[in-house]
């Protein structure tokens, strides 16, 4: 009797905990069943009095969704079911339920840190690859009662441990445990407790060399694992491990005859139980990564920008946090070198950074104290420290070099490619380069950076890019000297710039010489500039010769210009030739002009040949332009022929354009046939076009059927069209049901859009209902609040704005502040402005500063002005500078203008007006210089 009482009490307590968890989760039982991947009847009976205790698998699945401690629930379930299964008894064996493990505690490399007061390590989305299928099969076989072992072999940070973690997820809902032998040492923990492993346990041997390669215990561990796998009464278990290739080779290689065999048992254990995984993602996997990135996985999106070419996604993800940690905790000298490298890459210097440049550039990144403590070998120590690799074989700054070019023997030799590197060169880790572009975006490098670039860089593009960067930041003196160096190295843009300066100074001969050098260096556009100069100087013959040189070099603009000149001179044949060459060089409008020229001459065969040529190359843009011309000229047949040519070339998009042309011409049967062809080709968008065509023709039944077809194909917009169709037919119940379907199945933004449609139609009640439905969306709430305002319901508006503000919408906070301000509640207004300012909005900070200023609190106003300036936003800095100017605070204005100049965003005319000779790297005005 006592036993029965205990069983009933345990079952009641189990169901009570389930009920409490369900209430906290805010779910119903249908939703719970879906999330737990259980049948509705199974879930219903787990809660229902009079039914037997649920299975262990059901208990674990429900505990996972309801975030309840599954081991306690399993204990209750064991008592209620009067079971003495060793796996459910008091001695559960080593380990704990999989649900209680954090993957990072199992040595899955963290790939990023989430936001919040207490940062949380986060994992990116997972992309299965070929080896995952084999791993999953092993886990499923274990779930079916068979013991299995698999060891993943791969180089560092290729995703081995994460793959194992993903493979065991199906076991989580089946009540499986996981044991990671770790304490006091991995090998000792494994040997001590392997005999205690119970059925339905995952044995986690990550970095298996620590177990199997232990000189004293490795062979004994291998033997114990073998016994675990082969003893029927201990089934099922799943043993998962990881190894680097060098360890796998060492353990599986046969020793030479007569030599000791230290890994014989390990070799036998691993035979047939290893799986090699690739170092890189193949193209299919990279496409899957791109899909996850587009769906909002920022970690994968960032990694893809750096690793899309070489496919080392997992290595990039694994190394990123450690690279950042190494940067943030570097020695002052190492950090100075990294910051110089970051600035070099973001301002346009190539991948291979000379050591001499980085060494000299780093000096002014050091504080005075750190500079005074420099030792003679500081640079060698810094570069050695930064070359130490992290996960994924990445280093913050690794030594590198450009690959030599290989040419066949006896082939033509060309001029040597200019290089910016003489001596050792280093490459900044991609992740740190990206980090630098973000965090140092608004900073101007110190003087040592510019001086080192001028002294050590030789590549014309490096020098030219730095000259532009210096000029954007109004460091005019350094821009001038770097541009001279770039010009001497043959940088076309710099030569062109200097030529324009000579031209502006009236030195036409010097300008022409520089334009000529720029053209010789490969700047074909400079020949065009030089030709323009000759033409303006009254030398049409010289200008023509230069235009021809630019055209001979393939400059599309010059070819187009010459074609126009030949056309104006009546030389149709010459004009055609130049238009054809300009079109070949990429001027799409040249093809249109060429068609016009042939049409004026009545050369219809030539027009047809051009159309055929464009169709052969797939240039649908040019054909569309030509078709539009024909349609505008009233030649509907010609326009249709052009589109038909693209259709015949296999472009189904052109079918839609062709159908629309026929529709515009009143050929509805022809348009319908073409739309149907698009539908038959698998493009469901055409269903809507076809439905609208039938709707316009009064065939509402046909339109409804097509809209329904688009809905069935997953097109949410078609739901709205279908609802509108029913509404126009006065089928209000049907329309309402469809609108509700949109609201139920779409994201809040779609619901907001639907509500706006109702609002525009004057159905304010229906609009408000939909806005209320999207109440979890802050944008929907703010729109709803605006409607309340328009109705004069100020209290209702404030309440809804408050809900949007609580959901984190800064605009709602600002509107609440404005409402309080209008009501004369300055203190309340400031409270809401401060909350909005906490989101980092500089405009809100400026508004707060003004409020404090008007209240006579100069100190408080200054605090908010400084906070706004700290965002580094160029527009904010310029705005603050102008405010200081208006207030007569010239010194304060100067400070903000200088900081805006550092970002490279201060308008050039404003900068020149304030500092005609530029700024020094430290931001102080440059004195006059020659």
Image: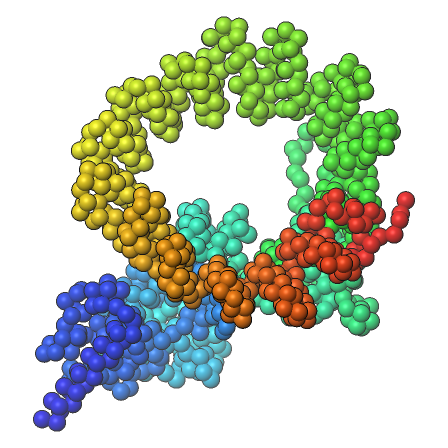
Residue drawn at 66 percent across, 54 percent down: 879
Whether residue 127 is visible to the viewer of this picture, yes or no, is no
Question: Residue 71: x and y, percent?
Answer: 29, 80
Question: Residue 569: x and y, percent?
Answer: 66, 8
Residue 211, compared with residue 741, is above or below; it is below
Residue closer to the observer: 812 or 491: 812
Whether residue 519 is visible to the viewer of this picture, yes or no, is yes
Residue drawn at 18 percent across, 69 percent down: 43
Identify the image quadrant of residue 427.
Answer: bottom right
Count the marks. 0
Question: Residue 568: x and y, percent?
Answer: 64, 10
In this rendering, would 397 be left or right of 915? left
Residue closer to the observer: 657 or 449: 657
Residue 319, compared with residue 67, is above or below; it is above
Identify the image quadrant of residue 548.
Answer: top right
The scheme the figure's colours follow is rainbow
Quadrant housing the C terminus: top right
Residue drawn at 85 percent across, 26 percent down: 508
In this rendering, would 738 be left or right of 362? left
Residue closer to the observer: 915 or 375: 915
């Amino acid at each position: 009797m006592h036993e029965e009482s205990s069983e009933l009490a345990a079952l009641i307590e189990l169901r009570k905990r389930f009920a409490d968890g369900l209430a906290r989760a805010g779910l119903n039982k249908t939703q719970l069943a879906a999330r737990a991947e259980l049948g509705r009847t199974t879930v219903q009976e787990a809660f229902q009095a009079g039914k037997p205790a649920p299975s262990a698998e059901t208990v674990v699945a429900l505990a996972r969704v309801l975030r309840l401690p599954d081991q306690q629930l399993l204990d209750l379930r064991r008592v209620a079911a009067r079971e003495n299964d060793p796996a459910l008894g008091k001695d559960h064996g080593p380990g704990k339920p999989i649900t209680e493990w954090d993957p990072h505690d199992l040595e899955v490399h963290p790939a990023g840190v989430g936001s919040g007061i207490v940062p949380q390590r986060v994992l990116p989305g997972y992309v299965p690859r070929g080896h995952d299928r084999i791993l999953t099969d092993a886990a499923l076989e274990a779930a079916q009662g068979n013991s299995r072992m698999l060891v993943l072999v791969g180089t560092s940070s290729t995703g081995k441990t994460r793959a194992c973690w993903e493979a065991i997820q199906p076991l989580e809902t089946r009540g499986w445990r996981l044991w990671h032998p770790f304490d006091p040492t991995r090998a000792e923990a494994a040997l001590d407790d392997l005999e205690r492993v119970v059925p339905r346990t995952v044995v986690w041997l990550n970095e298996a060399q620590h177990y199997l390669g232990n000189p004293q215990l490795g062979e004994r561990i291998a033997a114990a694992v073998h016994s675990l796998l082969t003893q029927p009464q201990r089934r099922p278990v799943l043993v998962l491990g990881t190894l680097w290739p060098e360890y796998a080779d060492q353990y599986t290689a046969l020793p030479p005859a007569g030599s000791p065999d230290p890994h014989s048992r390990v070799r036998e254990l691993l035979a047939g139980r290893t799986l090699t995984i690739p170092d890189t993602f193949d193209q299919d996997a990279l496409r899957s990564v791109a899909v996850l990135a587009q769906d909002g996985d920022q970690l994968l999106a960032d990694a893809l920008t750096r690793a899309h070419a070489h496919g080392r996604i997992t290595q990039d993800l694994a190394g990123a946090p450690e690279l950042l940690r190494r940067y943030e905790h570097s020695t002052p000298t190492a950090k100075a070198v990294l910051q110089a490298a970051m600035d070099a890459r973001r301002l346009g210097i190539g991948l291979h950074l000379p050591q001499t440049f980085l060494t000299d550039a780093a000096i002014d990144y050091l504080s005075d104290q750190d500079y005074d403590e420099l030792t003679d070998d500081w640079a060698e120590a810094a570069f050695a420290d930064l070359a130490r690799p992290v996960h994924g074989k990445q280093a913050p700054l690794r030594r590198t070099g450009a690959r030599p070019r290989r040419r066949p023997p006896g082939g033509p030799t060309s001029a040597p490619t200019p290089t910016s590197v003489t001596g050792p060169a280093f490459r900044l880790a991609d992740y740190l380069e990206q980090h630098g572009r973000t965090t140092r975006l608004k900073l101007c490098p110190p003087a040592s950076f510019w001086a080192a670039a001028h002294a050590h860089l030789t590549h014309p593009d490096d020098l030219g890019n730095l000259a532009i960067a210096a000029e954007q930041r109004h460091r005019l003196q350094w821009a001038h000297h770097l541009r001279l160096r770039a010009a001497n190295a043959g940088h076309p843009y710099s030569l062109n710039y200097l030529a324009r300066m000579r031209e502006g100074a009236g030195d036409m001969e010097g300008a022409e010489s520089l334009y000529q050098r720029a053209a010789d260096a490969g700047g074909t556009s400079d020949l065009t500039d030089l030709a323009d100069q000759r033409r303006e100087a009254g030398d049409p013959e010289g200008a023509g010769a230069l235009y021809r040189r630019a055209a001979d070099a393939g400059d599309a603009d010059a070819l187009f210009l010459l074609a126009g000149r030949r056309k104006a001179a009546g030389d149709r044949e010459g004009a055609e030739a130049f238009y054809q060459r300009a079109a070949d060089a990429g001027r799409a409008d040249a093809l249109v002009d060429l068609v016009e020229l042939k049409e004026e001459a009545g050369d219809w065969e030539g027009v047809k040949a051009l159309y055929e040529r464009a169709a052969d190359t797939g240039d649908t843009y040019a054909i569309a332009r030509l078709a539009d011309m024909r349609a505008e000229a009233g030649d509907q047949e010609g326009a249709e022929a052009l589109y038909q040519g693209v259709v015949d070339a296999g472009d189904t998009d052109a079918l839609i354009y062709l159908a629309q042309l026929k529709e515009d011409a009143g050929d509805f049967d022809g348009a319908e046939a073409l739309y149907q062809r698009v539908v038959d080709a698998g493009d469901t968008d055409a269903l809507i076009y076809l439905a609208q065509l039938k709707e316009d023709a009064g065939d509402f039944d046909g339109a409804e059927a097509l809209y329904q077809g688009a809905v069935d194909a997953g097109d949410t917009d078609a739901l709205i069209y279908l609802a509108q169709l029913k509404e126009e037919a006065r089928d209000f119940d049907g329309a309402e049901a469809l609108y509700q379907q949109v609201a139920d199945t779409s994201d809040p933004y779609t619901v907001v859009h639907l509500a706006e449609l109702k609002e525009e139609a004057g159905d304010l009640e229906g609009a408000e209902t939909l806005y209320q439905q999207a109440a979890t969306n802050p944008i929907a709430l703010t729109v709803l609040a605006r409607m309340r305002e328009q109705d004069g319901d100020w209290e209702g508006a404030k309440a809804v704005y408050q809900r949007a503000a609580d959901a984190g919408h800064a605009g709602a906070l600002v509107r609440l502040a404005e409402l309080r301000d209008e009501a004369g509640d300055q203190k309340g207004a400031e409270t809401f402005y401060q909350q909005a300012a906490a989101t980092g909005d500089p405009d809100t900070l400026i508004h707060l500063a003004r409020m404090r200023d008007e209240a006579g609190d100069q100190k408080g106003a200054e605090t908010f002005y400084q906070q706004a300036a700290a965002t580094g936003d160029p527009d904010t800095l310029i705005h603050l500078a102008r405010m200081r100017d208006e207030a007569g605070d010239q010194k304060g204005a100067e400070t903000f203008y200088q900081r805006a100049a550092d970002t490279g965003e201060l308008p050039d005319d404003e900068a020149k007006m304030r500092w005609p000779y530029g700024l020094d790297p430290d931001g102080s005005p440059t004195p006059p210089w020659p």
